[in-house]
Amino acid sequence: MNVLELTLLLAIMAFAAGFLGSLTGMGGGIVIVPGLTLLFGVEIRYAIGAALISVIATSSGAAAAYVKEGFANIRLGLFLEIATTIGAVVGAFLATKISGNSIAVIFGGILLYSAYAMMRNTQSPHKTNAADALAVRLRLDGTYPLKNNLVAYHVRHVPLGFALMLAAGILSGLLGIGSGALKVLAMDRAMQIPFKVSTTTSNFMIGVTAAASAGIYLNRGYIDPGLAMPVMLGVLAGSMLGARVLAQANVRILKIVFSVVVTALAAQMIINGILGKI
Amino acid sequence: MSKPESPDPEYQSGTPHLWTDLEVETKVGNLLRAGVLTSAVLVGIGAVGYLVQHGSEQPHYGKFNGEPGELRHAALILQDAFTGHSEGIIQFGLLVLIATPVARVMLAAFAFLKQGDRFYLGVSLVVLAILTASLLGLSP
């Protein structure tokens, strides 16, 4: 297989990943690393570098599309980005200290959790309406549009949310993923923020988080232009198409298909990692 | 339009004026779209040259070698791109993509400055400092 053939195959895989990732809400980045390492035999650090690039592309593209809807809480996002960017720098640092095989096993675990989170996808049942002193002092409370009104909500458990965001950042920098599932968990469950606000704010933060670790990967020489090029263009095109057909798609079946694919990739990553084949 | 700028969280629901959260969000949306588009065009241009020059070679991704210096550091990538080196152009496109969220934080910092919101100006500057350090290779 020469470079041209590989580039075309990578672009097709990335397109499919972006398309499915966008339809299922899971993001395309998470299947890029297993796809590159398991299917194409790419060294895991090159794979993570390319995946980080694709994560920034989809996050920025999607955020541009729905930032005007008024759901994203910019103050909250920026405040929590202190945690995710510090985490991302730490994660990118850890990536140089941990073996590729260990990274593969951790990656497999995160894939399994993400598949589970996607299938469950139910929002936290009851949100309290009580104000939290710290959140009020930080002015994190916000409003979101509902029909023609603005609904006010309170943000709770700021320290717990901040700690979870630190973890999300570390995983993002270590594995080259957006950590969207963990970010939504932190906001929806821990901080008791309305689901739609959590998902849009999370997506908003993903690009900044990934940029923090991508800078380090670039400086370390882990981002290869020949590899990142088809992955970035493919994922971007796939996720844009996915966002367009989202309204008509039967997402339920797609989610089942995608979670089976992700679970299989997870098992393969863990097995290969343990056998030292990554 | 003449409503005074204030850091009061309630102003979100007030009448629109310059640098309200809503206006900032519109600007941010445009900025992100422009950044992603510019990046995709640059990467696409570089891709054509890259595939013409290297399309028939054997890929080398199975083993980690690391990229050469001119494809690692912002200043050198710019230099390489302007000499017309196709890999340099792709890398420049990727650099634009990485810089897009950074520009978004800068825009937020500027908006908080305009709103007189010193706390969130500080928050934005902390995030910006971390991002800049990472891009300049000042990591641990």
Image (tube, coloured by chain):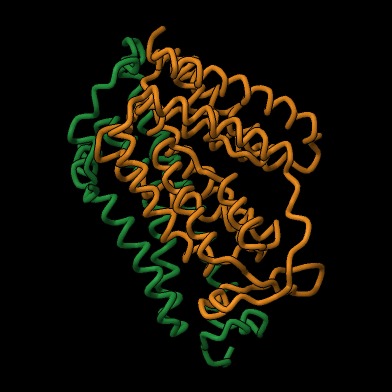
Count the numbered circles shown: 0
Name which residue lies at 44% across and 48% down.
A169
Does residue B48 show up? no
In depth, the one of A111 and B60 nearer the eye is A111
> Chain A drawn in what color?
orange
Does residue A97 show up? yes
Name which residue lies at 57% across and 35% down.
A28
Q: In the rendering, at what x and y percent does residue A256 appear?
A: 75, 28
**Does A224 sit left or right of A72 as displayed?**
left
> Chain B drawn in what color?
green
Q: Quadrant of residue A238?
A: top right
Against A15, is A248 above or below?
A: below
Q: In the rendering, at what x and y percent does residue A27 appear?
A: 59, 39
Against B6, is B105 above or below?
A: above
Q: Quadrant of the N terminus of chain B?
A: bottom right
Against A23, is A207 above or below?
A: below
